[in-house]
Image: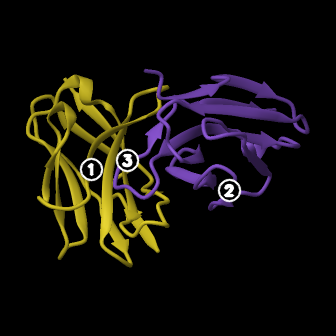
Chain colours: A purple, B yellow
Amino acid sequence: NAGVTQTPKFQVLKTGQSMTLQCAQDMNHNSMYWYRQDPGMGLRLIYYSASEGTTDKGEVPNGYNVSRLNKREFSLRLESAAPSQTSVYFCASHNRNSNQPQHFGDGTRLSIL
Amino acid sequence: AQSVTQLGSHVSVSEGALVLLRCNYSSSVPPYLFWYVQYPNQGLQLLLKYTTGATLVKGINGFEAEFKKSETSFHLTKPSAHMSDAAEYFCAVRLSNFGNEKLTFGTGTRLTIIP
């Protein structure tokens, strides 16, 4: 009963390096989301995928790309990391067209030096 | 469109005292409302939700919240605080019409329990 699994849990990058954050869910949800959490700002939506094969920008998409690999997996890529992208990243999933809540992973803590 | 305001980024209460965390929202259609809790270095866990029906909703760990449409509020309460309640709490809103199901979060309230 894993729910939403994120890898890695921690990562340190140098400015300009690239990285992909992985997310997988085993609840057969069709919608998936990437958020970033910064102190005093709550969670802000980066990108989301309402269903397999579709992705859309959220509130703060600049500097990121996503791939909905299949129904289970939704990855977030930083092509050229910047210190401003130091944050905690959360993946979530949800059953589209329902009143059910989003389920969250445990997060990836990313530091960019 | 929707938005959430959580009044008080930090709240301290004594163990055994009433916990009250405030949340006000705005929404262009009837909202779905959620409270999530985040313990240190962990993800977000759902405490409770309001979608339709009874406006007083009960959640886990003795928490409850009341949806008040006239006040556009969804405040979180617990009659008697416990040390294990120390965490950060987030209120979130989404529109109830299917097809636009993005969550909008408040900025969070960090709850400290004084022994």
Instruction: Give the residue displayed 59% in from the left and 53% down from the top.
Output: A51
Gap in angstroms between the C-alphas marked 2 and 1? 27 Å
Same subunit, tags 1 and 3 = no
Q: Is residue B68 above or below residue A86?
A: below
Give the residue pinned by disc 2. A54
Amino acid under label 1? Lys
User: Could you say whether the residue bearing mark 3 is in a helix, strand or loop?
Assistant: loop
Amino acid under label 3? Pro
Q: Indicate the chain on which mark 3 is placed.
A: A
In the rendered image, residue B2, in percent from the top left (x then y), is placed at 43, 70
Give the residue at the far right of this rendering: A16
Q: Is residue A59 above or below residue A84?
A: below
Which mark is drawn over residue A101? 3
Q: Nearer the viewer, residue B36 or B10?
A: B36
Q: Nearer the viewer, residue B107 or B26?
A: B26
User: Could you say whether the residue bearing mark 2 is in a helix, strand or loop?
Assistant: loop
Gap in angstroms between the C-alphas marked 1 and 3? 8 Å
Q: Indicate the chain on which mark 1 is placed.
A: B
Q: Are marks 1 and 3 in contact (CB under 8 Å)?
A: yes
Give the residue pinned by disc 1. B49
Instruction: Give the residue displayed 11% in from the left and 58% down from the top.
Output: B54
- For label 3, count other residues whose C-alpha is less than 10 Å away and answer few (under 14), some (14-19) or many (20+): many
